[in-house]
Image: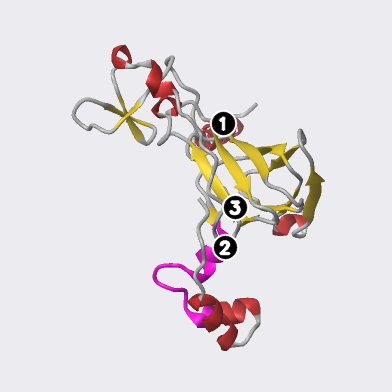
Amino acid sequence: MNGSLVISLFTLLALASSFASAYDPSPLQDFCVALNDTKLGVFVNGEFCKDPKLAKAEDFFYHVMPGNTSNPLGSKVTPVAVKEIPGLNTLGISLARVDFAPYGLNPPHTHPRGTELLTVIEGTLLVGFVASNQNDNRLFTKVLNKGDVFVFPNGQIHFQLNVGHGNAVAIAGLSSQNPGVITIANALFKSNPLISPKVLTKAFQVDKNIIAYLQKQSWYNNN
């Protein structure tokens, strides 16, 4: 093996390592409880950490209440991430409870930093995700009942619709302490400042009046 090939291999390994570290890293200690105090904490992975000797059980605890679905979407997402449980910091995991009124919708959205594993606790949901351009924007969709589980790969646009006559509840596990969320309609038509209508009319191939109408709507955020 010549020297240039060895150097190339080490370069690839270094790049792979840097890409891997772009996601939540594996912790090097038992826990690193997030702390909103720049004087008493050490900055680790986006949060300040308190002295582990000062950690307490409450740092790892959170009670999730049912979400209020009395809104235009008929759904409510209640996150349980590092902001809710400081002890999640550096552990690379979080979850969310999603409540649905009858026919409620968790609209098309994406998580830029996490894969989602959804479990239906109550009711019947129509769920799906759309693959990227390289996979011809294929739609993967399925009707889920109580006890069913479905995976939404990292970064893919996905949705859940309650197709039952009663309420529905689902629990979503996510592979990041802070997976983030981008609701597609809100991002396109309620950005701050607004995206130029010239961009949107050309992108969607519609009349400018349609874009103006969409930008005037009160796009609800159920998170």
Please provide percent x and percent y for residue 7. 54, 32
Residue under numbered circle 1: 13
The verdict on residue 197 being magenta is: yes
Q: In the image, what residue type sits under mark 2?
A: Pro
Q: Residues within 10 Å of mark 3 (few under 14, many from 20)?
A: many
Give the magenta part as a residue range.
183-199
Q: For the residue labelled by badge 1, is the local secondary structure a helix, a strand or a loop?
A: helix
The quarter of the rendered structure image containing the N terminus is: top right
Residue under numbered circle 2: 72
The mark found on residue 152 in the picture is: none
Residue lying at 60% horizontally and 44% vertically, measured from the top left: 98
Residue under numbered circle 3: 75
Q: CA distance from mark 1 to mark 3?
A: 44 Å
Q: Residue furthest left?
A: 39
Q: Are marks 1 and 2 in contact (CB under 8 Å)?
A: no
Residue lying at 54% horizontally and 59% vertically, measured from the top left: 71
Specify whether 108 is left or right of 165.
left
Please provide percent x and percent y for residue 90. 44, 27
Residue lying at 47% horizontally and 35% vertically, measured from the top left: 81
Specify whether 168 is left or right of 32.
right
Q: Is residue 207 above or below residue 45?
A: below
Q: For the residue labelled by badge 2, is the local secondary structure a helix, a strand or a loop?
A: loop
Q: For the residue labelled by badge 3, is the local secondary structure a helix, a strand or a loop?
A: strand
Residue 116 can be seen in this image:
no
Nearer to us of marks 1 and 2 is 2
Please provide percent x and percent y for residue 17. 53, 31
Q: Are marks 3 and 2 in contact (CB under 8 Å)?
A: no
Q: Are marks 1 and 3 in contact (CB under 8 Å)?
A: no
Image quadrant where residue 40 sits? top left
> Which of the marked residues, 1 or 3, is nearer the chain's N terminus?
1
> Which of the marked residues, 1 or 2, is nearer the chain's N terminus?
1
Q: In the image, what residue type sits under mark 3?
A: Ser
